[in-house]
């Protein structure tokens, strides 16, 4: 998505644009170590997530505020991981689903893995 197009969209539209067109999306920040953990876990599983670095995106601040609403006020919203168009959660949820064995089937169902 071009930056000019993104700036004319509201944050919900930008979020929907990315999550509806990509099997796995990670909303991240270049300085966030937990975002790095989430991205590395997905890459190590053979998933190539679409990564949106909010500190480098035209609508990043507004998207970050929207993610706070999705995550709940008690949680840091980054990284925010979406699988199959649905909000999975942050790094804790991502790691927990990997440990309990539900992440791989979820990724397969979303079309992010073909194994």
Image (tube, rainbow, N blue to C red):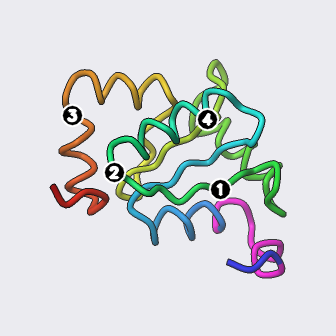
Q: Which residue is denoted by mark 1 in the rendering? A: 52
Q: Return the residue at label 4.
A: 35
Q: Which residue: 49% across, 43% down?
A: 81
Decide: marks 1, 3 in contact (CB < 8 A)?
A: no
Kindly state the secondary structure of the residue where label 4 is placed. helix
Q: Nearer the viewer, residue 114 or 100?
A: 114
Does residue 98 sit above or below 12 in this rendering?
above
**Foreground: 13 or 48?**
48
Q: Nearer the viewer, mark 3 or mark 4?
A: 4
What stretch of residues is rendered in magenta? 4-13
Distance from the alpha carbon under mark 1 to that under mark 3? 24 Å
Closer to the chain start, of discs 4 and 1, is 4
Q: Earlier in the sequence, mark 2 or mark 1?
A: 2
Q: Seen in the image, is 29 located left or right of residue 82?
A: right
At a point 47% along the width and 35% down the height, the residue shown is 89
Judge left or right: residue 44 versus residue 30. left
Q: In the shown orientation, is residue 22 left or right of residue 68?
A: left
The residue wearing badge 2 is 46
């Amino acid at each position: 998505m071009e930056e000019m197009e993104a700036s004319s969209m509201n944050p919900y539209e930008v979020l929907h644009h990315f999550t509806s067109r990509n099997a796995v999306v990670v909303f991240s920040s270049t300085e966030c170590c937990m975002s790095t953990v989430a991205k590395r876990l997905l890459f190590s599983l053979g998933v190539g997530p679409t990564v949106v670095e909010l500190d480098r995106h035209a609508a990043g601040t507004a998207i970050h505020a929207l993610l706070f609403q999705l995550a709940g006020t008690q949680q840091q919203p980054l990284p925010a991981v979406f699988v199959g168009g649905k909000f999975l959660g942050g790094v804790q949820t991502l790691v927990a689903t990997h440990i309990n064995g539900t992440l791989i089937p979820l990724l397969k169902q979303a079309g992010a893995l073909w194994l």
